[in-house]
Image (cartoon, rainbow, N blue to C red):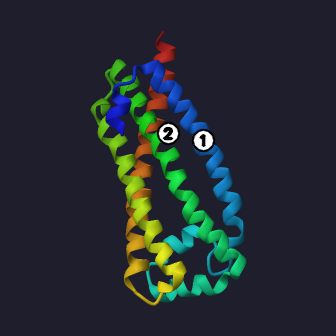
Amino acid sequence: MSSLFLTLNPPQRKHYFFLAVVAAVIMTIIMNVIGKPLITAAAPAGIVSFEMAGTSSQAQIILDSWDARAKLFAAFSLGFDYLYMLAYATAISLGCLLTALAIQELSWPFGSLGAPIALGMWLAGAFDAGENLALSFILLGGAAAEIWPAIARSCALVKFSLIFIGLIYVFYGLAAGVMRRRAR
């Protein structure tokens, strides 16, 4: 997908970046609203606590802390997350490509990392999808199988790491953008 973005000229990338950021922000707000009923003493971070459970016993403790309504919210959250991953992957991917342009213009280091990190956002989305699949199996009664919580946690750790790298790179690009404007 990031190779598709490479074919766009910089003004088009900025336009699509803005749209993707708006979509991602709106979806983040929706995910936070959906996630409120999932916050319990056993799951203080809501769905993220479930993602990071890691063991069947911890996943079961979280499931037991959720009533039937909360489990419906969890199921909806997992389904909605498939749309959300498209929005955040697009936004961060385009942000990485725009960052690469900004830092290359200033001859700053790491300009060549934009495209690989942008591709990493799609890999983050793939790990997010794998995580959601594992969490769905747990939610549908598979918490007893130790493999699903471990898969969900592993996928979540990779996803969050890749997203963190992408966001750090985009913030690096924001600093480059500010410096570029000051230089003009």
Compared with residue 114, is residue 149 higher up or lower down, i.e. above or below? below
Residue 107 position by quadrant: top left
What residue type is disc 1 on? Ala
Q: Position of residue 92 (x, y in %)?
A: 46, 41
Task: Decide which of tag 1 and tag 2 comes sooner along the chain.
Answer: 1
Using the image as rendered, state which of residue 117 and residue 125 is in the foreground: 125
Say whether marks 1 and 2 touch (CB < 8 Å): yes
Using the image as rendered, state which of residue 55 and residue 17 is in the foreground: 17
Compared with residue 90, is residue 72 higher up or lower down, i.e. above or below? below
Q: Position of residue 88 (x, y in %)?
A: 51, 46
Secondary structure of the residue carrying tag 1 is helix
Residue at the (44%, 34%) spot, across then down? 94
Question: Is residue 136 visible in this depiction of the protein?
Answer: yes
Instruction: List the residue tagged with mark 1.
Output: 23
Compared with residue 102, is residue 33 higher up or lower down, i.e. above or below? below
Q: CA distance from mark 1 to mark 2?
A: 9 Å
Instruction: List the residue tagged with mark 2.
Output: 91
Q: Using the image, tell me which numbered label, if any, was put on residue 129.
A: none
What residue type is disc 2 on? Ala
Compared with residue 157, is residue 7 higher up or lower down, i.e. above or below? above
Secondary structure of the residue carrying tag 2 is helix
Q: Position of residue 87 (x, y in %)?
A: 52, 45
